[in-house]
Image (tube, coloured by chain):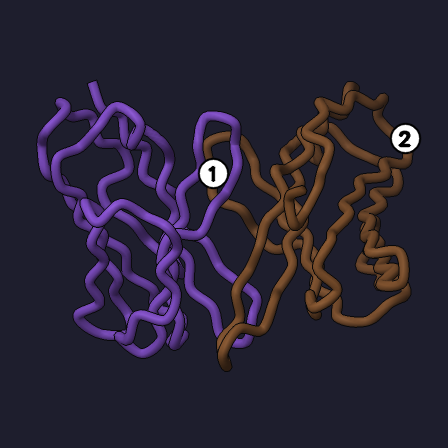
Amino acid sequence: DTAVSQTPKYLVTQMGNDKSIKCEQNLGHDTMYWYKQDSKKFLKIMFSYNNKELIINETVPNRFSPKSPDKAHLNLHINSLELGDSAVYFCASSQGGTQYFGPGTRLLVL
Amino acid sequence: QKEVEQDPGPLSVPEGAIVSLNCTYSNSAFQYFMWYRQYSRKGPELLMYTYSSGNKEDGRFTAQVDKSSKYISLFIRDSQPSDSATYLCAMILPSGGYQKVTFGIGTKLQVIP
């Protein structure tokens, strides 16, 4: 019973391509997040949705577009991928502060 | 100055040692404090969650918060090789009715058998 799941686990792609990462949580939480963890392991919030509504949008290039079709799903679409987008992307969900993370999607842009 | 400062380490200790991990923060509006453990190539998992100054104990782990000094600590007693991981402190800032979490960079811990 995976609480927060992400697909794909690994993503290797060329510069300029468009790709999507999907996230699903079965915890019944109202809030979901996307985080980026770079090569220095710093975990930085990108977006947060509460009940399908965008509530946090940090300074992220508009090539990144999140979408929440329902409160159990939060997807991340990235246009025109750049080398600097290579990182691990984590989805998380929360109810009242404590966050539960997915296993991460390792994105490598060549 | 970063909102949350944490020494990235690495920190190497012998098995059985007491480990002390620390974070300082600059924003006195932070209200809730957490410690996450992240094993290599895995997502962070919550270890401890506190909201008041003082100590909170859970098994071999003790979380300590000193709001007056803006300083939080995680102590691990009788450390085990399985404790080898990166430990991230995290703090919650209520923001417009929602809660925004800020993470430290994480301290990499290695417990040597």
Q: Output the letter for the chain in purple.
A: A
Residue visible at 28% across and 37% down in the picture: A9
Residue hosting label 1: B42
Residue visible at 53% across and 73% down in the picture: B95
Image-based side of A48 in relation to B44, left or right: left
Closer to the chain start, of discs 2 and 1, is 2
Residue B53 in percent (x, y) is at 86, 67
Residue hosting label 2: B17
Image-based side of A91 in relation to A66, left or right: right
Q: Is residue A21 visible?
A: no
Could you tell me how far apart the alpha carbons at marks 2 and 1 are, in whole angstroms? 25 Å
**On screen, residue B68 above or below A22:** below
**On screen, residue B60 above or below B31:** above
Q: Chain of mark 2?
A: B
Q: Amino acid at mark 2?
A: Ala
Residue visible at 22% across and 52% down in the picture: A76
Q: Colour of chain B?
A: brown
Q: Nearer the viewer, residue A21 or A110?
A: A110
Image-based side of A80 in relation to A55, left or right: left
Label 1 Cα crowd, 10 Å radius (few <14 / some 14-19 / many 20+)? some
Residue B34 in percent (x, y) is at 68, 58
**On screen, residue B10 above or below B99:** above
Label 2 secondary element: loop
